[in-house]
Image (cartoon, helix red, strand yellow):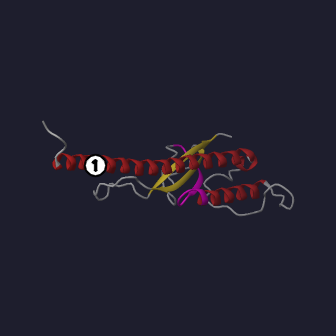
Amino acid sequence: MQQGYSLIEVMLTVVILSIGLAALGLLQVNNVQNTYNANNRSAAATAAADMADRIRANLVAYENGLFSNIDTGSDNNCATGAGSTVCNFTQMAQDDLNQWLTNLANILPAGQGIICVDNGITDDGVPGAPACSGTGNTVVKVFWRESASFSDDQVGDDIDNQWQSFGLVVFP
């Protein structure tokens, strides 16, 4: 009859427990990274919806093509309230775009955006080359950098720090 555990049994138990705890730690790291990336995607979708609402609120500018293929704006101080500037529809469109781009830069890693006319896949392209066809619907495209939660030492297949995009078609 045995009375206790041998040293080999105890060491084997410690090794198995260590491997399990290491795997649990890696799972937690992946979970945190995926939660961060999901938060970025949610922020991009919310920002695109915000710009779509701004376009719908300024239909005169939309109908005059001021929201077609635009990626820069200007601060015209068109905010509502006391002390703000009374703006026409062109100035309001520029001001809305400026506020939106500033917001993107603040809420997303390397956040950028464009409003363009596109008839294909709306969540494609990268900043500087947004893949807008020039025909079709008005599209709000949001771009940001996203990190991967994994790496396998294979050169060229990691998606770490790659551009991600989200597109939203606007129907005013």
Residue 112 lies within the magenta run: yes
Which residue range is magenta in the image? 106-119
Q: Could you say which is closer to the camera, residue 135 or residue 17?
A: 17
**Residue 32 horizontal side relative to residue 60, left or right:** left
Q: Position of residue 15 (x, y in %)?
A: 24, 50
Q: Residues within 10 Å of mark 1 (few under 14, many from 20)?
A: few
106 relative to 48, above or below? below
The residue closer to the viewer here, 166 or 65, is 166
Residue extending farthest bottom: 75
Residue occupying the point 67% across, 61% down: 73
Q: Quadrant of the C terminus?
A: top right
Whole-percent x and y of residue 86? Answer: 84, 58
Per the image, label 1 sits on a secondary structure element best described as: helix
Task: Name the residue furthest right.
Answer: 82
- Left/right placement of residue 109 relative to residue 152 reads right
Could you tell me the amino acid type at mark 1? Answer: Ile
Magenta span includes 8:
no
Horizontally, residue 53 falls left or right of residue 42, namely right
Residue indicated by mark 1: 19
Horizontal and vertical percent position of residue 143: 53, 54
> Which residue is located at x 41 percent, y 52 percent?
29
Determine whether, in the image, residue 156 is placed left or right of residue 108. Answer: left
Observer-nearest residue: 26 or 56?
26
Q: Nearer the viewer, residue 79 or 29?
A: 29
Q: Name which residue lies at 50% across and 47% down.
A: 38
Q: How many marks?
A: 1
Q: Position of residue 167 (x, y in %)?
A: 55, 46
Give the residue furthest to the left: 1
Look at the image and tell me in which quarter the N terminus lies: top left
